[in-house]
Image (cartoon, helix red, strand yellow):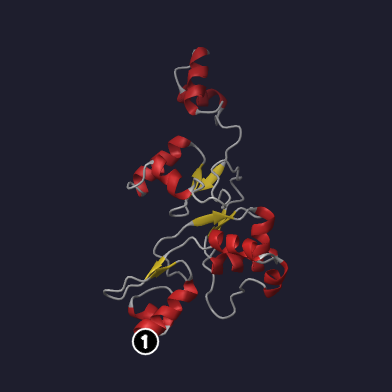
Amino acid sequence: MSSCNDFIQHIQEHEYSGLLEYKERFGDIFSEVSYTICYICGEKLVQDYVDIVDHLKKHHEEHSVKSYYEEFISDSTPFEPQLFDLSQCISDSSLDFEPIASTSNDTPLIHDMDFDIYESFDIDKYLHWVNKCSIFCKEKGCVFSSKILETLQQHTLQAHKQTYQEYCQLYNIDPSNPWVRTIFTICKICATAVRNNKDEVECHMKVNHNISGLIYYLENI
């Protein structure tokens, strides 16, 4: 059965009044449950249209299913692969949320060797895919925005004469999570939800899978 409504119609043909009566006799109606995450807040969801609609209404009422799909799932660029696939099946026990990565100097970046091996077009596509979260400068009257943390760090120093740490302290921002708009991706190796920005993707791949984000992208996306 592809939908709950189809299933309800089917069991009514067997003279059951509805799901409650059927479940009392046979237990859970789902033989296999698939999961996804909300790409706005990272919450784990049963991969079912009704559940997704209910989640959007409760937590992201500015989005309809159509606008959510178009903004976060639909392939909107000519060369970019499908980033978020609601048809992915993720088991109940396998979906974990990746802790916020450190933004210290020790955070692993893309391996220099990877840049030497792969074509610049591959690297450009990777950087376009990996940098999805957005930052906006909070200084009054400033319209600076970026999807790359390093550019914000440079901006605060050059435009506002503040180190990044001073800027974060002034505006009560967690230095490891300055994102104003956060997008999540699911690691296809371990099904962990990771914030879709270069620092955190690179850190996750290095710490958990001993590969760079670029290698992950070329082999899995």
Q: Nearer the viewer, residue 158 or 206?
A: 158
Left or right: where 203 falls relative to 195: right
Left or right: where 117 falls relative to 43: right
Specify few, some or many for label 1: CA neighbours under 10 Å numbering under 14, 14-19, or 20 or more. few
Q: Please determine whether, in this image, residue 88 is positioned above or below residue 14.
A: below
The furthest residue to the left: 141
Q: Nearer the viewer, residue 19 or 90?
A: 90
In the rendered image, residue 6, in percent from the top left (x then y), is placed at 50, 22
The furthest residue to the bottom: 161
- Which residue: 57% across, 38% down? 33
- Which residue: 54% across, 61% down? 128
Q: Please determine whether, in this image, residue 173 is positioned above or below residue 32.
A: below
Q: Is residue 109 visible?
A: yes
In the rendered image, residue 58, in percent from the top left (x then y), is placed at 35, 45
- Which residue: 46% across, 66% down? 147
The disc labelled 1 sits on which kind of residue? Lys
Residue 50 placement: quadrant: top left
Q: Please determine whether, in this image, residue 41 is positioned above or below residue 202.
A: above
- The mark tally for this picture is 1
Q: Please determine whether, in this image, residue 134 is positioned above or below residue 140.
A: above
In the rendered image, residue 175, in percent from the top left (x then y), is placed at 44, 75
In the rendered image, residue 39, in percent from the top left (x then y), is placed at 47, 52
Question: SS class of the residue under badge 1?
Answer: loop
Q: Is residue 166 visible?
A: no
Left or right: where 98 falls relative to 190: left
Q: Which residue is mark 1?
A: 161
Q: In which quadrant is the N terminus drawn?
A: top right
